[in-house]
Image (spheres, rainbow, N blue to C red):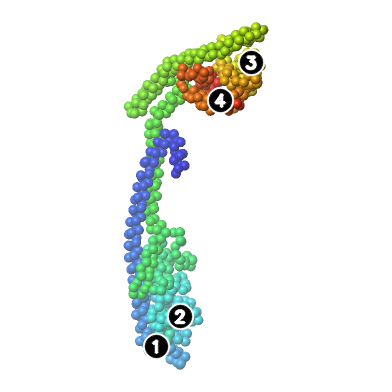
Amino acid sequence: MKKLYTSLRYLSFSKQLFIYFLFLCIIPLLLAIQIIYSQGTKSIEHASTDFIKLYASQLNTTINNYVLQIDHTSRTIFSDYEMISFLKNESSYSTGDSIKHNLMISRQLIRFSDQLPFVEGVMIVSNEGNIYSTGNTKIETVYNDLSNQTWFQDIIKAGGQLVLTPYYEKKTLKEREFDVFTAGRLIKTQQGEPAGIILFELSSRSLIAIDKDLFQLSKTYDAQIAVHNKTGELLFNMIPQYSVDTPKTKQANASPSSHPAEQAVLSISNQSSTTGISVTIDVPEQKLYQRLDKFKQLSFLVTLIILIVISPISVWISYHITKPIRRLISSMKHVDQGLYMPIPNSTRKDEFNVLTQHYNDMILKIKHLIEDVLTSKIKQNEARFLALQNQINPHWLNNTLESIRMEAQMTGTPTVANMIKTLGKLFKLALNESNQPHRICDEIEYVETYLELQNIRFDDRFKLRIEMDETLLNAPIPRLIFQPLIENSIIHGFLKHERNYHVTIKGICQNNKCTISIHDDGEGMSEQQLKSIEDLFKRNRVEDTPTKSLGLKNISERLRLHYGESYSISIESTPNKGTVIAFTYSLNDYNKLEE
């Protein structure tokens, strides 16, 4: 979200306005659809829950009624003492009696089938393992197979109580396979001795046949119905494929299973307090909310159509609102190029029209300021520059004339002529009125001439070294920048006249930043003197500067006038080691100066 918000901030105002307008139109609609869908989902869930609870209760009641009916019907066998006696000890009867009793048992099984039409088959297992059966089962039942079943042993252990066995196999009933479970009980004699077992075979098919409309839920909503006995064992698990009209190929692949774990289901259970039978119904929520999902898809389709209709309207609104802003930006670009052109008046009467009028007034005022005020300011700076330049000439001229006077008084030698010759050269360089711009190489020549004159006075004690990039030699520079700095070094730094002193002028230029520095190995300055000079640069006017610091302040002011804010000056000094004065400016600024 943070990256999305950052990306949105860098879009143009028209695009932002377009996105915001769509957002304000579409988001409330989507929220309304989501709220309606959420409320509809809750309503369907509550209604479906109530319906499924009622359905589970009715189904459980139906199953319990049939179980109780089987229980009551199966008890009638205990009143046939002759049949029970035969079942207990078949081998003791003659062949004729055995045939007679077999017919008796067959009639009884038929009566059970007539009384219990929902039962798939009835089976009686004698005490000696003989099996008598009737119904729809088409496979032979082997006693050993039955006796090995756990549920068969449970019936024996129940001592005559009706037992519902769990799901144990599939059987082919009327050419279709179905889950089979049984309801069985132990047949006992009057003395309580086991005589056999009676089994009633049930299947999911038989329950479907009872009430087809009752099981319509299974087909419509893909509901899964699971029935368990009181011990929690599965009696049968009816899934939607268990339909009367299902082909054999599909039915053969159906098996008791639950819905996939990833599929959300609505599960409702109902347990009978009489028999302990519980019915659990699982309905897939996807199937339950299928119609509501169609409504949601239709809503999103309508939203998409609205989006298609709103998009061009949003573009038009965005263009209509931002058109004056684009005109304003275009005019600002012209101002940046030096063209102060007002924006033509429009027919709009809104706030943008007021903004345009104020902008036009501002442009006219700026144009007036540039043509009048700025021009006047430039002339003032030029006059100030000339005044600063004129202030510096008497400062070194007096010292020079004093040197000539003292030399002439003490020696009266030709040295005086040489000094005057050098002084004439200085005058020529200083008073040069050529239209050519003053360059760094001219300034170096002036310094060399100045030090030549000083060396006549001080017996060649000053050594000058130039380390300047070739690209800087022809660069323009104001007049009399280096000489006053070297003069300060001679006056304040070279106090001991018994040794030689060295002055180095360095110039480097890297990445459009040029630095020119003057190094000497004089006496240096203390921290207090450095602090005084730093305070000097904080003053705004030359008139406020002490006389002894006039040259340094003058140079700084003149350089700042030429190079602007890119100019900076720094001073480093160590007592008894020397001083370094460096000033830095932008190469682009002195290129402008040259132009």
Which x, y percent locates residue 81? 37, 89
Distance, label 2 to label 4, CA atoms, is 117 Å
Mark earlier in primary sequence (2, 4): 2
Q: Is residue 468 left or right of residue 113?
A: right
Which x, y percent locates residue 123? 43, 80
Report if residue 209 is visible in the image.
Answer: no
Distance, label 2 to label 1, CA atoms, is 17 Å
Q: Which mark identifies residue 153?
A: 2
Residue 434 occupies quadrant: top right
- Element class at badge 1: loop
Q: Report the residue at 39% width, 63% height from top.
A: 267
Mark earlier in primary sequence (3, 2): 2
- 77 or 425, nearer to the observer: 425
Distance, label 3 to label 1, CA atoms, is 150 Å
Q: Which residue is mark 1?
A: 192
What number of labels is visible? 4
Which x, y percent locates residue 133? 44, 81
Q: How many other residues sit within 10 Å of disc 2, few (<14), some (14-19) or many (≥20)?
A: few
Mark earlier in primary sequence (2, 1): 2
Q: Report the residue at 37% width, 81% height from top.
A: 74
Residue 332 occupies quadrant: top left
Mark earlier in primary sequence (4, 1): 1
Q: Report the residue at 40% width, 40% height from top.
A: 308
Residue 495's place in the image compared with 397, above or below, is below
Q: How many other residues sit within 10 Å of disc 3, few (<14), some (14-19) or many (≥20)?
A: some
Residue 217 occupies quadrant: bottom left
Q: Amino acid at mark 2?
A: Gln
Q: Which residue is mark 4?
A: 525
Residue 4's place in the image compared with 569, above or below, is below
Q: Which residue is mark 3?
A: 458
Q: How many other residues sit within 10 Å of disc 4, few (<14), some (14-19) or many (≥20)?
A: some
